[in-house]
Image (cartoon, helix red, strand yellow):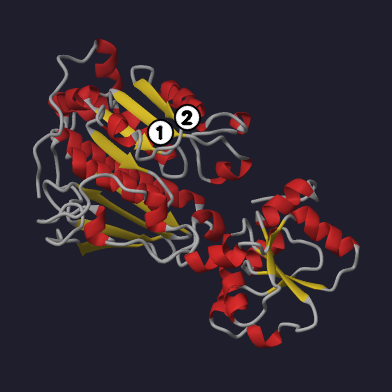
Amino acid sequence: MSLPPLVEPAAELTVDEVRRYSRHLIIPDVGMNGQKRLKNAKVLCVGAGGLGSPALMYLAAAGVGTLGIVEFDEVDESNLQRQVIHSQADIGRSKAQSAKDTVLGINPYVTVNLHEGRLDSTNVMEIFAEYDLIVDGTDNFATRYLVNDACVLLGKPYVWGSIYRFDGQASVFWSEHGPCYRCLYPEPPPPGMVPSCAEGGVLGVLCASIGSIQVNEAIKLLAGIGDPLVGRLMIYDALEMTYRQVKVRKDPDCAVCGENPTVTELIDYEAFCGVVSEEAQEAALGSTITPRQLKEWIDADEKIEIIDVREPNEYEIVSIPGAKLIPKNEFLMGTALQDLPQDRKIVLHCKTGVRSAEVLAVLKSAGFADAVHVGGGVISWVHTVEPEKPVY
């Protein structure tokens, strides 16, 4: 489905710009007119992480005239395996500032606008209104639904991407011409069902594969060329090296873009997606201990059984002394319950406290009333008890 160009062309290209973009200019489908449209375009990238890194760099190289960056985080050493817009020297710096420096290093003719802070219901409409196109590089469901709903309400298209381990997905959502994200995923998965990249990992180069697809789609939309991924979901398997497409149809009953929408304004997306289930929240209430409290119990030789509910590869990176590894899934299936000691207090932990809270709910319902979990998980343990150990 071909669509008209998203933006009008700029008045002219300078001599320097002609030299810079000459390989675009000699492509008949792009040419001088298409490059002028890119120069006149304003594109916002939500996130300067795994997907935002290649997206911002190639948007800049392509000659998109104005780039916006929404980012609240700082560069961490664990980012550098995939977030190639940042370098070793940027550790501890604002990701937005670091990304801006790299973008201007690639193309000084680009105007870069920074929006440093969390994107939420109070600022998203004002920020998005400044731009022609949104590129979604987020890694959590709450922000994905926020981006989608804001774009539908503003009538703006956005290019979506998602990555996990060796798998990637990409599509273009534009409710005026096709489905939106809610047509594909009407509701978020149950809390804890889908692990994040921080929990499950991601192959670094996968970010480049999906990020480049996003930029490709952005250029097509801005210049009005080719057949954009509107109504199509691209699925990439890096291990099998396969691409396949799934048609996505507009849902007439969609809550936000359907014929009778029930979502006509922004909502509380954290509550809608629920990072932790209600059962886990209730279980953790009054049954959460700090790493220092656990250390005191260990030093006092208290009768406790420390159980790590992460995956084996995580356990190999760093662990709490004396912790026994029993992955979360074994509790959800019920196979781990029969082997738990009855004469010791069960102390659960994971990476940050989310998975252990879910397992705690399982244990409470199974009769382990005095079980507790470590708030902040092994990451908090390292920061407060064993800072010489690595984090991930």
Residue ID at (51%, 45%): 82
Horizontal and vertical percent for residue 28? 13, 33
Left or right of 204? Residue 305 is right
- Residue 375 located left or right of residue 161: right
Please give the name of the residue rendered at 61% of the width and 62% of the height, measured from the top-left corner: 285
Q: Quadrant of residue 348?
A: bottom right
The residue lying toward the viewer, choosing from 359 and 267, is 267
- The amino acid at mark 2 is Ala
The local secondary structure at tag 2 comes to helix
Front in this rendered view, residue 364 or 203: 364
Residue under numbered circle 1: 70
Q: Quadrant of residue 289?
A: bottom right
Which is more toward the observer, 247 or 294? 294
Residue 22 seen from this side: yes
User: Closer to the N terminus: mark 1 or mark 2?
Assistant: 1
Element at badge 1? strand
Which residue is tagged 2?
A: 96
CA–CA distance in space, label 1 to label 2:
7 Å
Q: Check if mark 1's residue and mark 2's residue have beta carbons within 8 Å.
A: yes
Residue, x 56% and y 43% (percent of image)? 79
